[in-house]
Amino acid sequence: MDDSASLRTLLVGIDAACDRILDPMFEDGELPTLESIYDQGASGSLESQMPPWTASAWPSLYTGKNPGKHGVFGFLRFEGYDWDVVNASDVHERALWELLSERGLTSVVINVPVTHPPRTFDGALIPGYTAPEDPDCHPSGLLSDVREEIGDYRVYPDEDAADLGTAYAECARMRGEAFRYLADRYDPEFGFVEFQGTDSIFHKEPENDAAIRRIYREVDRQVAEILDGCDPDNVIIASDHGMGPYDGHEFRVNEYLRREGVVATENGGRGMPAWSTIRENDLKRGEATGSRDPGVAERAMATAARVGVTSQRIGAVLERLGIEDLVAKYAPTGVVNAGATQVDFPASTAYVRSRVELGVRLNVEGREPDGVVPPEEYETVRTRLIDALRSVRTPDGEPIFDAVRPREEFFHGPESEHAVDIVTVPADFDHFLSATLREQQFGPPSEPWNHKLEGTFAARGVDIDHADGIDNAHLFDVAPTVLATLDVPIDDRMDGRPLPCVEPPGTRSYPRLGETDSVATADEAVEDRLADLGYLE
């Protein structure tokens, strides 16, 4: 790129980055480019939102608004008792690059989660997480051009690769090369490139320090080459949440609610969650359930389940025999699901639909297709459940939750009605909340590492006053801060504010996106990936 390049602000998203992960690599001198941004700029922890998971947190970051406004609360959206994986059609607020487009500014956006299918704006976009492997891009045909230019481009790494560190690092390289190519082609004022493997590796191989460091070294190298080739006036680093060990317990909320007489169950039915329950992390590599007709094995398992021979009981026997890993490796997910004890949602008073939502939904008359809680009893039932959940203690006698609160204490806006009714915040994010039904309410965490509330933020550049710092930065503050570096007024409906290190540019009213129909994700490969990483149970 020549000296006339116009890139004013580069936003680098590093999924799950936090001090716990970065500091040891800084100390060892492995990430010189990132370390220089932290040392020379304004930096510190970045508090995430509820829930602090990729699919909801990135839309909050790029809109500056809470999920009650943009409408994405997790990896799944629900219509009655049916569900689908979320995508950009579920985001009901304008993204940063769309606001900038209205002001005549061009953007290049690479690999940001929940951006497929893309909407029209001035610039270029290759979608990230929850998109299919060959996604629609903006403008049409862009992905073919990128692949022709840089040799290859994948949205997702090869999860079956012998060396995941290499596979994820290769994807990081593609992100950087694609960004540099498109920045040269579109000459944007704003650039946004996101690196996802820094999160995924912890769901797959959290103890593989060599792989983790290899991925981060490649991210550092790509950031260095972007800075060298594009020479942005400002560079901002932000993560959507942190990552760390879970040293507490797995708490199976639906199992607790079943014993409280709130959750009803069925054996071998079509309850949801409908993912494996023998060995979550292994069986998720099995055959996708989809909408195909059940095979002989699935019908047999369903029949057995109806007479009490469920997958959970079989799993307990396999575990005692020490062969559950071997069986789980080869058992198709559909067979396991067919034999599982599942939540009977229409017959239940309340339940957990998706663990990453961090909350409980009530089955309300007139709102759900077969609701059983009369609207006039909603507050009474919700208050009773809140009190009950607040009283739950671990086997060690400690509270399982830091907070159990009504949804309106976390979400506000026109999409809040789609949130869980009760938000449950695990204590210190040290406990793993699960929606699965098991014989025991507690167990060891299914994943030894998972999301933490504290992410990270750093900013350096001509529009950054390093001395003023970032002062208790929140995820919602990233978008207003980016706008401030571009001297674009803040949307007065944003929940964040420009951080102290930038000059506030004032506010103005931007219209909310008009009502749009949600587009089905309809991609079993996306669902399989989410399940394989533990986001779907």
Image (cartoon, rainbow, N blue to C red):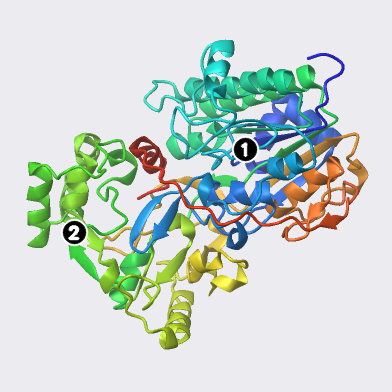
Q: In terms of depth relative to the viewer, which is nearer, 224 or 429?
A: 224
**How many numbered tags mark residues here?**
2
Which mark is first along the chain, 1 or 2? 1
Q: Secondary structure at mark 2?
A: loop
Is residue 64 in sight in this rendering?
Answer: yes
Q: Residues within 10 Å of mark 1 (few under 14, many from 20)?
A: few
> Image check: 487 left or right of 367?
right
Q: Amino acid at mark 2?
A: Gly
Is 17 above or below relative to 341?
above
Kind of residue sitting beneath label 1: Thr
- Residue 261 x/y as whole percent: 29, 78
In this view, the mark in front (2 or 1): 1
Image point (73%, 61%), residue name: 493
Q: CA gap, disc 2 to disc 1?
A: 42 Å
Q: Residue 164, position in %: x, y?
A: 45, 25
**Residue 30 in sight:** no
Considering depth in this image, is 145 or 29 the residue closer to the camera?
Answer: 145
Q: Residues within 10 Å of mark 2 (few under 14, many from 20)?
A: many
Residue at image coords 78%, 21%:
230
Q: Secondary structure at mark 1?
A: loop
Q: Residue at x 59, y 50 (%)?
A: 57
Residue depicted at x 82% and y 54%: 471
**Which quadrant of the rendered structure holds the N terminus?**
top right
- Checking the image for residue 269, the label placed there is 2
Q: Which residue is mark 1?
A: 120
